[in-house]
Amino acid sequence: MSRRISTVGLSFMILCSQACGSDTEKSSAKGPGAALKCTSSGKNAFDTFGTTAFVAVNEAIFANVGSEVTANGTTNLGDSFTKIGTGAPASTGDDAATFKGQLAAFLVYAYGGPSSITYTDGKMYLGPQDMVSAHLGLGITSSQYDYFIASVVVPALTSSGVSAADVSSCFAPIVTDAAFKASIVGH
């Protein structure tokens, strides 16, 4: 896949590591992907694929990160993922289940769904997030971001049934946006 198609989500693994917005923000917030239209349906990603598909992609992202860390350690992704739940500096401080729920909620929100979901652990998670704050202290590099998207997120999407055309049309534009990437890289 091209770099443009490949750039679909480093943000998503680490992004929901902080508390989310107020109740007012949650009820009225619309994610940046709400206006993007998938090639396959002419609707946004959430309306096209639904919560169940987003949870499946989220699970695939976590499986892909686990495989990557097992195979290559911190070489390609850095050490951010190895610190989940440890309380270490540049760590989310969340256990893996909480982190998964926050990520799933962010994905749903970012791509046009509601600003909260009940994840597979039965807990309610909220989606809106200040990206800079969520990534502060993680020191994610541009190459780590690009690798995560190309080698973790895009395969999670395509293995979950999202076509390359839909990856390009309704997923990639958010994470290929220079301002979005800048909110994650280098903090």
Image: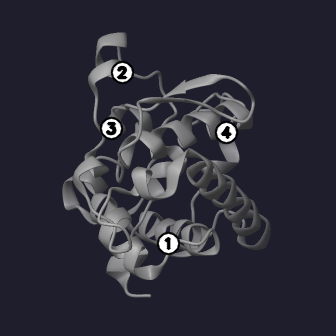
Dot 1 or dot 2, earlier in sequence: 2
- How far, Cα to Cα, is label 1 from label 4? 19 Å
Tell me the tag on residue 147: 1
Q: In what element is the residue under mark 1?
A: helix
* Mark 3 Cα shell of 10 Å, populated few (<14), some (14-19), many (≥20): some
- How far, Cα to Cα, is label 4 from label 2? 25 Å
| Percent of width and height locating residue 17 | 52, 33
Amino acid carrying label 1: it is Tyr
- How far, Cα to Cα, is label 3 from label 4? 18 Å
Q: Quadrant of the C terminus?
A: top left
Callouts 4 and 2 close, C-beta under 8 Å? no
* Mark 1 Cα shell of 10 Å, populated few (<14), some (14-19), many (≥20): some
Tell me the tag on residue 26: 2
| Percent of width and height locating residue 157 | 55, 68
Amino acid carrying label 3: it is Val
- How far, Cα to Cα, is label 3 from label 2? 19 Å
Dot 3 or dot 1, earlier in sequence: 3
Callouts 3 and 2 close, C-beta under 8 Å? no
Circle 4 is placed at which residue position? 84
Q: In what element is the residue under mark 3?
A: helix
Circle 3 is placed at which residue position? 132
Q: In what element is the residue under mark 2?
A: helix
Amino acid carrying label 2: it is Lys
Q: Quadrant of the N terminus?
A: bottom left
The answer to whether 172 is drawn above or below residue 78 in the figure is below
Q: In what element is the residue under mark 4?
A: loop
Residue 138 left/right relative to 44: right
